[in-house]
Amino acid sequence: MKYFLIALFFTTITSCIPLRIAPNFQEEGYKIKQAKKFKRKLPKENAFIFEDTKDVDEFYNFVNTKYQLNHLDVGLEVPFRIDEKLYFLSYYEVEKTTKTLNLLPIFIDGATSGTDLETDLYDNYVSRMGSWYLVITVIDNDSNDCLKESHPSYNKVLEYLKNLKKEYFSTHNYEELLFTKKS
């Protein structure tokens, strides 16, 4: 029993308690969810959400080049067509963090408080690791949410976004999207 209590004590003081966990979309690589529920400041439309592992502004450059926007309204109601129907894509870059409470630094500071060995590990009480996500919404000409399952074009739009994601991650030189040689 004595060894069990010692093991329990050391396990407790060396553990981390998760306070907030960033989403993980490894099953399908994306999630359809209401944007506002993913991040409070986003719109109420449903969104196609996936983790962006590329560098900052890569998706901006991808969208700007693919849709030939010349840096005008990139990310805000970008027009595209599926089967001759017009749709509008908007995207948002969102950071979500995993935040954990580290018990060992708290225990060490508490144990050394008021002694000659006093430490200051306050900055290590909480650790954070962030991930960036792309949140894409799509509306039609009548401003209807195309990522609602009840929308007639839901499956076509979802397939388009899956292909867009695949194209984004497989393309490194966005000039390739225009089928032009770089001069």
Image (cartoon, rainbow, N blue to C red):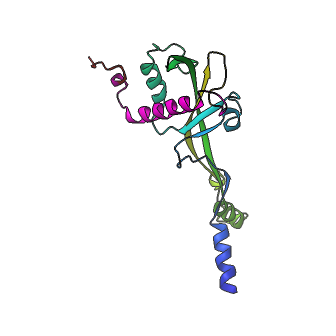
Q: Is residue 108 above or below residue 137?
A: below
Is residue 25 toward the left or the right of residue 125 in the image? left
- Residue 69, position in %: x, y? 47, 14
Identify the residue shown where x is 67% and y is 22%: 144
Instruction: State the image quarter where residue 62 is shown.
Output: top left
Magenta region, main secondary structure: helix
- Residue 157, position in %: x, y? 55, 29
154 in the magenta segment: yes
- Is residue 42 or residue 127 the one in the foreground? 42
Instruction: State the image quarter where residue 172 is shown.
Output: top left
- Is residue 114 or residue 87 the one in the foreground? 87
- Residue 53, position in %: x, y? 47, 40
**Placement of the C terminus among the 4 image quadrants:** top left
Is residue 91 toward the left or the right of residue 182 in the image? right
Q: Is residue 169 above or below residue 16?
A: above
Is residue 124 toward the left or the right of residue 180 in the image? right
How many numbered marks, from 0 up?
0
**Placement of the N terminus among the 4 image quadrants:** bottom right
Identify the residue shown where x is 67% and y is 31%: 150
Write the start and end of the magenta stretch as one range. 148-176
Q: Is residue 56 above or below residue 77?
A: below
- Residue 142, position in %: x, y? 66, 16
Outermost bottom residue = 1
Identify the residue shown where x is 55% and y is 42%: 131
Is residue 49 toward the left or the right of residue 167 in the image? right
171 in the magenta segment: yes
